[in-house]
Amino acid sequence: MHRCFEHGINYFDTAEVYGDGYAEIAMGKALKKAGWARKDYVISTKFFKCGEGINSGFLSRKHLIEGMNASLGRLQLDYVDVAFAHRYDMETPMEEICRAFNWLIENGKTFYWATSEWTPEQIMEANLCCERLDLIKPIADQPEYNLFIRKKFEVDLVPIYDKCGYGTTIWSPLASGILTGKYNDGKIPEGSRFSGEKLPKHLNDMVWGKYMTADPTESSKKLKGLAALAKEVGCTQAQLALTWCLMNKDVSVCLFGATKVEQVMDNLGAIDIMAKWTPEIDKKCEEIMKNQPEAPLNWRTWQPLPQRRSVNLDYPKH
């Protein structure tokens, strides 16, 4: 966190469920040690479940308020900047959810609230509920977005960006490390996250299968193609994957997770690659991945709408 802050990163994201609260404790200690002025950094945390107690989860008013108080204690903070609904709660009425987040804001526990992996319909329901009750609306979603996972971000959520002024804090831009280059041959190196030493086997299998598909050979071919393109551009494969995400105008915040300072420094190199990015590089990524989502039809003309990503390649390089 200290190295990130030194290089201009001032947004740090966590969740009550990460390590059942221990991630927030670790972050709180790091913030205390850093001694930064509170106005100079942004903290978000997410609420849905922490612990096995009957009242330790979901989006009831009780859990959101008690969960926030517990998170602030672990983080050693008076408030967080953004509070996320980590997932959609099918059993708690939307009005209760919206009123609870509004209470958190009005009582100084957070400045904003947001959603994470909600569907466009669920986000719109929350916005309409807030509008009807004159409550503070959510501001962003935290969806997965990377070179493998694209449709929800590039197609499904587009009306929400435009109609609700919604931002995004994308997660897994490196596809759980798959896009860093260490898995390009389709095999799992010893000591890596998919080796079974860091996650339960069923989670390993689920995440690995999501990216490597039923045909690891085909996925490996794509990864090797990205490695060759990264060499051509003059960057690492991880930097290529991160820059590809950053060049999408709808990405407000690109979250990456690092276990080593060296990974932080490598990832930061993506900022320099943004200045080199061209439509030609983007097109080469499309040719390698072959997974551009199908654009919706304009029913007046029966022609596909412009690809959301293709019209945003002039995103300011800052």
Image (tube, grey):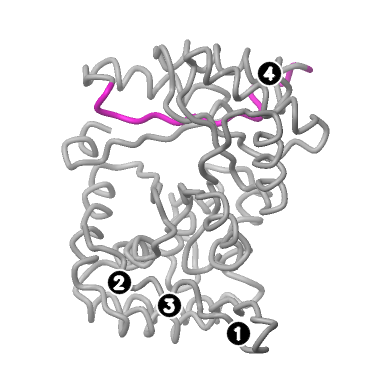
Tell me what residue is drawn at x 39 percent, y 14 percent: 77
User: How far is mark 3 from mark 1, CA to CA?
Assistant: 13 Å
Residue 116 in percent (x, y) is at: 59, 43
Looking at the image, tell me whether mark 4 or mark 2 is earlier in sequence order.
Answer: 4
Q: Residue at x 36, y 67 (%)?
A: 244
Residue range in magenta is: 39-54
The amino acid type, in three-letter code, at marker 2 is Asp
Label 4 or label 2, whichever lies nearer to me, is 2
Q: Which amino acid type is shown beneath numbered disc 4?
A: His
Q: Residues within 10 Å of mark 3 (few under 14, many from 20)?
A: few
Q: Residue at x 47, y 82 (%)?
A: 221
Q: Disc 3 marks which residue? A: 310
Q: CA distance from mark 4 to mark 2?
A: 43 Å
- Residue depicted at x 58% and y 76%: 293
Please state which of residues 273 and 261 is positioned toward the viewer in this rendering: 273
Looking at the image, do the residues carrying marks 4 and 2 touch, with CB atoms under 8 Å apart? no
- First in residue order: circle 1 vs circle 2: 1
Q: Which residue is mark 4?
A: 63
Secondary structure state at the residue bearing disc 1 = strand
The magenta stretch spans residue 47:
yes
Rendered position, 30 above or below 76 = below
Question: In the rendering, at what x and y percent does residue 146 appear?
Answer: 47, 63
Query: Is residue 3 positioned above or below 50 on the image?
Result: below
CA distance separating discs 1 and 2: 21 Å
Label at residue 14: none
Mark 4 and 3 residues: CB-CB less than 8 Å, in contact? Answer: no
Q: Is disc 4 placed on a helix, strand or loop?
A: helix
The residue identified by callout 2 is 314
The earlier-in-sequence mark between 4 and 1 is: 4
